[in-house]
Image (cartoon, helix red, strand yellow):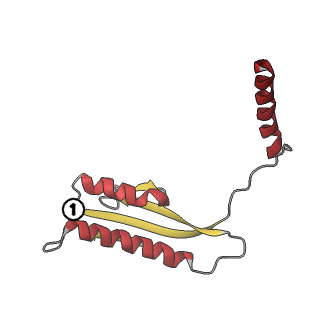
């Protein structure tokens, strides 16, 4: 989706227009996530850009899209350019370090035992 939205159309409440825009963006992302994934992908990721116009659009993380949109509206922008492009992605796996998660917690338990011995 590449689209320029007017934020202050005549005869409409600007807050309602902003909420409608956010709803449309969420609806688009939800629709794209329902599409069938390629075999080598785990989820749909989004390349997002947001700005006053296409030339001034900056890359934004999908989770920060609505917050950045609110910031842009607070600056008094009359229109906003939004670019959402879905792409298949794979989750990053944690590297095996050879250590288990229990080893770190037992070291913390040892330090607590040492503290208990000093108080006795």
Which image quadrant: the C terminus? Answer: top right
Q: Nearer the viewer, residue 1 or 114?
A: 114
Which image quadrant for residue 69? Answer: bottom left
* Residue 38, above or below 118: below
Q: Residues within 10 Å of mark 1 (few under 14, many from 20)?
A: some
Please name whichever residue, 107 or 47, is drawn nearer the observer in this view of the structure: 107
Q: Helix or strand or loop: what does disc 1 sit on?
A: loop
Residue 41 shows in the view: yes
Residue annotated with mark 1: 78
Q: Position of residue 73 (x, y in %)?
A: 27, 57
Q: Residue at x 67, y 64 (%)?
A: 90
Is residue 12 found left or right of 96 in the rendered image?
left
- Residue 82's spot in the image, x, y percent? 37, 65
Q: How many dots with numbers?
A: 1
Name of the residue lying farthest toward the left: 11
- Percent across and percent down for residue 36 are 62, 81
Residue drawn at point x = 38 percent, y = 56 percent: 67
Q: Is residue 75 left or right of residue 38?
A: left
The quadrant of the rendering that contains the N terminus is bottom left
* Residue depicted at x 17% and y 73%: 12
In front of the other: 86 or 117: 117
In this view, which residue lies farthest toward the front? 120
Task: Establish if 116 lies above or below 104.
Answer: above
Answer yes or no: is residue 57 visible: no
Residue 42 image-quadrant placement: bottom right
């Amino acid at each position: 989706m590449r689209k320029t939205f007017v934020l202050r159309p005549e005869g409409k409440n600007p807050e309602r227009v902003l909420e409608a825009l956010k709803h449309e963006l969420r609806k688009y992302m939800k629709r794209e996530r329902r599409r069938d994934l390629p075999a080598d992908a785990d989820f749909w990721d989004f390349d997002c850009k947001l700005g006053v116009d296409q030339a001034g659009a900056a890359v934004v993380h999908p989770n920060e899209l609505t917050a950045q949109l609110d910031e842009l509206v607070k600056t008094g922008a009359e229109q906003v350019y939004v670019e959402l492009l879905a792409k298949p992605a794979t989750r990053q796996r944690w590297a095996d370090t050879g250590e288990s998660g229990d080893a770190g917690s037992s070291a913390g338990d040892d330090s607590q035992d040492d503290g208990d011995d000093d108080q006795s």
